[in-house]
Image (cartoon, rainbow, N blue to C red):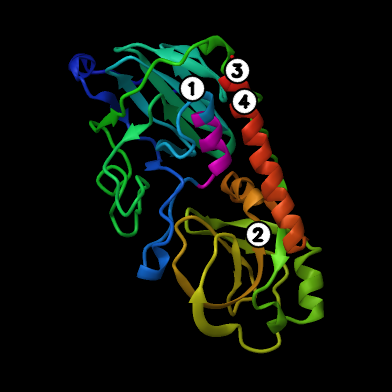
Amino acid sequence: MKTVYIQPNARRCAVGIKIVRGGLLTTVQDTGRTGRMKYGFSQCGAMDADAMKTANILLSNEENAAVLEMTLSGIAAVFTQDCAICISGARMEAALNKIPIRTNKVYAVSAGDVLICGKTTSGARSYLAVSGGIDVPEYLGSRSTDLKAKAGGFEGRRLKTGDDIKILPHKKPNHIEKRETAEFKYNMGIVLRAVPGPQDSMFTEEDLKTFFSCEYKVSAEADRMGVRLNGTPLQGRGTMNIISDGIAPGSVQVPESGLPIILAADRQTTGGYAKIATVISADMPLLAQVLPGHYVRFREVSVKEAENAAKARKEKFDKLKEYINNI
């Protein structure tokens, strides 16, 4: 981990978090803005909603409290007020006052404390939550950053050296030493459950068999908008073009190249390519943690199975909240 030099006057700022190094791509995110795509605004929000919610629950925050999403490498910062923090998602080299800390565990922080987050060691995105939540103005009902529109979050952009991040009013969580859960584990190969459609009829039976059986490799074109895959091209029954329609999170578009693209948080609101399937919401957090060179397979499921997976996911968070509420 590289040495980061802290300016002496950084400790005297009464804001909340003083950014000393912004990391590769660090943005403010929450669960995103809903009901706005019809006006042309992307949903945005945390790519890995499970990690974001886990960190917030461990801190007794609202589940959708704004956090810092750190991609591949993290921030270096000085805290200018007392609070508690939790990092979740991808494991990373992180230290609080030079003492290593782990993910999915709450730590007490005092004014003047220094947090240094290095590279991720497993996964792509880590989330830093603070007690109370990150305080930035809401834009269209969300604090999430829309990088394309240069709106929301902190001035509509990624964080950089010198930024002062405010923290919402909060109470110090009790029993901090008990506020932890198992770390997430990520593999180089993942299986994403997907419901066929809505334009699966534009593909041959052989295409569908290929899609749900072969292994795809994550290309270098993988970001918050979507993940382009390399593998056996799908042929289709003709053109892949359709009259543009709305795009749900997890939609798997197939352009003329025949290579699937899984659309993610910052996806465009409409698209003109056929969508062979839609990744279920419960598995989208797995997509958030893939890196170029990782492998993806798809498993066909029904709408009912997708609903059951969503219920199981909610029950998992309900159990964590129950544990935290009872400590």
Dot in front, 4 or 1: 4
Circles 3 and 2, Cβ within 8 Å, touching? The answer is no
Q: Nearer the viewer, residue 282 or 20?
A: 282
Can you identify the residue that label 3 sits on?
326
Query: Can you give x and y, in whole percent of width and height, for residue 323 in the image?
Result: 63, 22
Dot in front, 1 or 3: 3
Kindly identify the residue that appears in the image at 40 percent across and 54 percent down.
33
Can you identify the residue that label 2 sits on?
279
Quadrant hosting residue 327: top right
The local secondary structure at tag 4 comes to helix
Q: Which residues are magenta?
A: 47-56
20 versus 66 height, above or below: above
126 versus 262 height, above or below: above
Kindly identify the residue that appears in the image at 53 percent across and 36 percent down.
53
Dot in front, 2 or 1: 2
Number of on-image labels? 4
Residue type, numbered disc 3: Asn
Q: Give the Cα separation between the discs numbered 1 and 3.
A: 29 Å
Residue type, numbered disc 2: Val
Can you identify the residue that label 4 sits on?
322
Taking the magenta stretch, the answer to whether it contains residue 52 is yes
The local secondary structure at tag 1 comes to strand
Q: Which secondary structure is most common in the magenta stretch?
A: helix
